[in-house]
Amino acid sequence: MSFTILKYKEVNSTQKKIKEMIEKNKGKDWLVCWAESQKEGKGKGERIWFSPKGGLYFSVLLPKSCLDDVQTLTFLAAFVIARILKEDFSLEPLIKLPNDIYIGEKKICGILTENFLKGKELLFSIVGIGLNTNIREFPPDLEKKSTSIFLEIKKRVSNKKILEKILKGLKNQLEIISS
Amino acid sequence: MKKRIKIGNQIYEIEILKIQENLLKVVVNEKEFYFSLRENEDPQLLSKEEIEKIISFSKENVLKEKKKVLNKVLKSPLSGQVSEVFVREGDCVKINQKLLTIISMKMENEILSEIEGKIKEVKVKKGQIVAKDDILIVFE
């Protein structure tokens, strides 16, 4: 099964975009909505994920799994991304459980999973990831608590390559845990 | 399964079905006969009136069972914290309507209704911690 990647210049939120696709019966396993920027990127609860142009923002519709596997995958997603940051960019990421990634004391990545259950039956799960890749500056309220790959290594990186690596990693992990 | 027996020159096609715990249906050449089944007793051939009585009684039971299923509760599929409750007592909800959200280890779980019905009681409040299988909502 390959990925179906839909790329957008700007969306309200990639999570919302996937939900809209599902409502229109256009949802399918490993559908990916990737946006260059988000007006209201979904953070935890009502929080908004700062999503200017430059960062990597995407949501993935997972194949139907059980709740335990999705929970495990949400943890493992952080390991997949931390590994890429360490191996490809020589960063020293820290995973703050369950699934935020920090460089030192500054957050670089957030992962959020939304499940939709009909009673106990898991209908679908969407994993949303926001990774600060090529963000050159943060607003004053985030400056001290956020960082990006660009700010750490002073080089631009390819969002496309990172996206493909993360997706491959997620798929491998889901195959392992659900086998 | 149908069986054929021959008595003299006549061939009979017979089928015996246990249609419920206390009722046996015997079909002989497409003609139906009903027998009552009681413990330690031989099967008794039933009259038309007796059959109707038994069948209508079991229909009533089926309806009662269906009602029981509808009068159900929504249990929490996982442990976590209730972050939003979208419905109130007395609300009529439709299938797939959003009822509440539970946050669990950074997963946001939207719980949708699996039935159409009226809410008798909402057992949880925003911010409440729930364990797996705790009752969240009772339907009428």
Image (cartoon, helix red, strand yellow):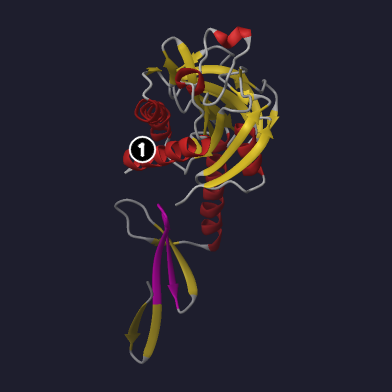
For the residue labelled by badge 1, is the local secondary structure a helix, a strand or a loop?
Answer: helix
Residue at point 34%, 29% (across, down): A87
Residue A162: % across, % down: 46, 35
Q: Quadrant of residue B28?
A: bottom left
> Observer-nearest residue: A121 or B64?
A121
Residue situated furthest front in the rendering: A154
Q: Which residues are magenta?
A: B14-28
Residue at 41% from the left image edge and 30% from the top image edge: A77
Q: Chain of mark 1?
A: A
Viewer-proximal residue among A139 and B97: A139
Q: Is residue B114 above or below residue A155?
A: below
Three-letter code, disc 1? Gln
Residue A65 sits above or below residue B52 on the image: above
- Residue B115 shows up from this direction: no
Q: Of all residues shown, which one is farthest toward the bottom? A: B9
Residue A121 visible to an observer of this rendering: yes
Left of A66 or right of it: where is A44? right
Q: Residues within 10 Å of mark 1 (few under 14, many from 20)?
A: some
Q: Could you tell me how many numbered marks the image carries?
A: 1
Residue found 47% across the figure and 44% down from its top: A63
- State the image coordinates of residue A79 (x, y, percent, origin top left): 37, 27
Say which residue label 1 marks: A173
Nearer to us in this view, B139 or B133: B133
How far across and down, in percent of the image, does residue B78 sit?
45, 25
Displayed quadrant of residue A41: top right
Task: Report the residue at 49% width, 76% height from top.
Answer: B30
Residue that protrudes farthest toward the left in the picture? B40
| Magenta stretch: includes residue A50 | no
